[in-house]
Amino acid sequence: MRLTARRLNRATLDRQLLLRRERLPVAEAVRRVVGLQAQEPASPYLALWNRLDGFDPAELDAAFAEHAVVKATLMRITLHAVVAEDYPAFHNAMRFALRASRLNDDRYRSTGLSTADADALLPHLLELAAKPSTGAQVEAALAERLGREPPKRLWWALKTFAPLAHAPTGGPWSFGLRPSYVTAGIQPSTVDQAESERRLARRYLEGFGPASVADLARFATLYRSRARSALAAVEDELVRYEGPDGTELFDVPDRPLPDEDVPAPPRLLGMWDSLLLAYDDRGRVIPPDYRKQVIRINGDTLPTLLVDGYVAGVWRAVEGGIEATAFRPLPDETWDGLTGEARALVAFLADRDPAVYRRYGHWWAKLPPAETRLLK
């Protein structure tokens, strides 16, 4: 069966709980959508606010505190929030990419340390992080272990690929800008990497299918050959479709494919929402003309207006409400829908962080001329 681009868009919105807000426990919602981008502490909370009916942020606070949901460096070598039972396989599947991103980097190699040197320190690091430890505490312990001040990039490398989670430190969104790290409640995978890649591939399709080999590779930072092998190993469990350009797409069976004319309500997505970054073909959600406005050159991915299932602009919290910038003309009824979302978002932010994402405001000076409204 050949699927249209619009039907793929609707399938993604459905899997990502964006066609309608659902009533689900927080951990189940995170499991359903596979993972939430957590580069900014607020983003997992805004992701669930967009997806759940009656979302109480205290439930996510509790899930992080109890390690039911784990925040760690995973897919695309960025911070994600995933359910604890997914973490071992996801981390193991990402192991090569996480290690290579640091140990093959000239900034690490310039320290004079080898890969073996880093590996030799891992057991000591994991023992230390049995209780929450700040970066400064870890570096002090490494200095004691080495008998000298550790090279500047040693901890930078270790914290990326070691099986560590971020420990809640308080603040409006459970985590501040100075992380604390912990191993408690996390068990490294005991299976081989290929088996973990197969689990990651199937879980990815559950939350983002139908998708291609290239999509899986981009989502997980896997070599395409490894993504292809992972899908081939479970192909008997999958169904296949043809994309609008003829690309082969894979999916788990018995998952709905909504019609392309199913209405998609407006949403105000947070920074780095996984919806925008999960595919090699970003056009599934981001019109090509808008991609550079939304995903900046350094990788910052701005908060977006989602209109009829596609990015139509960006938003930011300002004094008095939500400032929405539309990249194309929007009808009055769409502005009405966005205004309703903005009012609910202002109320949601009021007790936590009314000026959320404030430090990214410099990007708005670089946007092209567009219609901007204060929604309140």
Image (cartoon, rainbow, N blue to C red):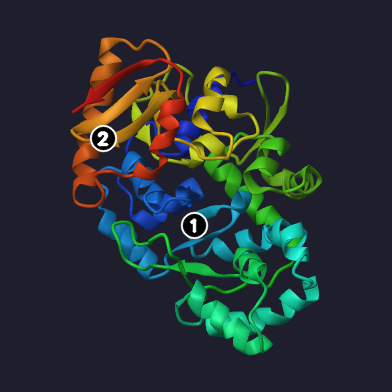
What's the mark number on residue 318?
Answer: 2
Q: Residue furthest front?
A: 149
Q: Amino acid at mark 1?
A: Val
Which SS class for mark 2? strand
Residue that appears at 25% across and 38% down: 345
Where residue 18 sits: x, y (%)?
40, 34
Marks 1,2: beta carbons within 8 A: no
The residue that disc 1 covers is: 82
Q: Is residue 224 above or below residue 184?
A: above
Q: Is residue 361 left or right of residue 226?
A: left
Q: Amino acid at mark 2?
A: Val
Residue under the point 33% across and 57% down: 173
1 or 2: tag closer to the N-terminus? 1
**Percent x, y for residue 136?**
50, 75
Front-most of residues 46 and 191? 46
x, y percent for residue 375: 23, 26
Of residues 369 and 116, the one nearer the viewer is: 369
99 is higher (above) or lower (below) than 221? below
Q: Nearer the viewer, residue 48 or 209?
A: 48
Considering the image in quadrants, where does the N terminus appear? top right
Answer whether residue 22 is visible to the viewer in this image.
no
At horizontal 37% and vertical 10% (from top left) the residue drawn is 329
Is residue 28 found left or right of 348 in the rendered image? right
**Image quarter hosting the C terminus:** top left
Q: Secondary structure at mark 1?
A: strand
Q: Position of residue 310 (x, y in %)?
A: 46, 23
